[in-house]
Image (cartoon, grey):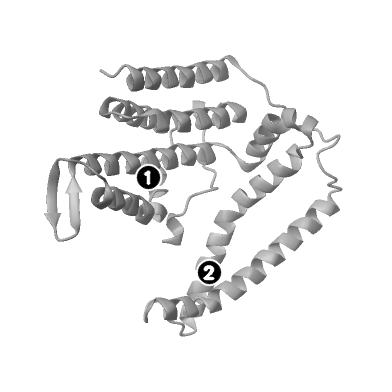
Amino acid sequence: MLSDITLGQYYPGNSVIHHLDPRTKILGTLLFIIAIFMATNTAGYIFLCVFVMAVILASRLPVGMVFRSLKPLAFIIILTMALHFFMGEGEQVLFEWKFLRITQEGLAMGIKMSLRLVLLLLISSVLTFTTSPIVLTDGIESLLNPFKRIGVPAHELAMMMTIALRFIPTLIEETDRIIKAQTARGADFSSGNLLQKAKNMLPVLIPLFISAFRRADELAIAMEARCYRGGEGRTRMHELAYTKVDVGAFVLIVVVMAIMAALRWWPL
């Protein structure tokens, strides 16, 4: 299960998506998320699914790896679908037994809400898979720079967000290592009720917290040893620059939003 968590991992590649400016990818992801919530009919969802698959193929990422990012949140997706199935209101009843009642409207809404979560997770995974943490930090900082005038610490926020994202795979690997070590010593994490299982996780959580604090301390010492003093006056080896491909990609996402708006207010 832990090995299926892919958030924060970077997959090196030489695709068009990999070479896009990080600001283009971040803004494009945000605009696409807005487009997802603009979808209200079948045509809109089909169009979004086709677009996401085209982006995945253009990024040259292993399709199985991208879809594996859905597995850790499968419970939330299924729960969202079930809640709409059994709690959605409607007139056309498809199934009814005692207090359980499934309507055609609730069924459609459950599928749509779950599909929204799937599309959101897939496009977010493509962003992290195709953008290295350092480049992602530069992109976030560049986008936050205009807010420095009102006191927003752009560099510090970007650094914290990227460090948190970068350490997710590291902590997952550490958790898996601790679980295997405790299992080899006779620990049992599968038997018992929910409360007992929670207590059984203490031998994992305590070493994990200690390891996390140790890594944070080591990172702080390493940054101080390299004379890190914040974002003021810092330079970059590779400066961010928009290209014609970035402009084309941004225009494409704007066209996608325009199509979604047309499908919402002027459905086929």
Q: Mark 2: which secondary structure?
A: helix
How many angstroms separate mark 1 from mark 2 (CA)?
Answer: 24 Å
Where in the figure is residue 202, as x and y percent of width and height? Answer: 54, 78
Local crowd size for mark 1, using a 10 Å CA cut-off: few (<14), some (14–19), many (≥20): some
Q: Amino acid at mark 1?
A: Phe
Q: Residue 177 got which mark?
A: 2
Residue pictured at 46% horizontal, 79% vertical: 183
Viewport quadrant of the C terminus? top left
Is the residue under label 2 in contact with that under label 1 (CB below 8 Å)? no
Q: Mark 1: which secondary structure?
A: helix
Residue pictured at 40% horizontal, 20% vertical: 261
Q: Is residue 262 toward the left or the right of residue 8 in the image?
A: left
User: Farthest residue in the bottom direction?
Assistant: 186
Local crowd size for mark 2, using a 10 Å CA cut-off: few (<14), some (14–19), many (≥20): some
Where in the figure is residue 163, as x and y percent of width and height? Answer: 66, 49
Against 259, is 104 above or below? below
Comparing labels 1 and 2, the label whose residue is closer to the camera: 1
Viewport quadrant of the N terminus? bottom left
Against 83, is 42 above or below? above
Against 85, is 148 above or below? above
Q: Is residue 129 toward the left or the right of residue 82 in the image?
A: right
Q: Is residue 217 visible?
A: yes
Where in the figure is residue 151, as x and y percent of width and height? Answer: 79, 36
Which corner quadrant of the image does residue 155 belong to?
Answer: top right
Q: Is residue 209 toward the left or the right of residue 265 in the image?
A: right
Where in the figure is residue 188, as x and y percent of width and height? Answer: 42, 81
**Observer-nearest of 92 and 107:** 92
Residue pictured at 51% horizontal, 79% vertical: 182
Residue picked out by circle 1: 67
Q: Amino acid at mark 2?
A: Arg
Against 35, is 162 above or below? below
Q: Is residue 57 visible?
A: no
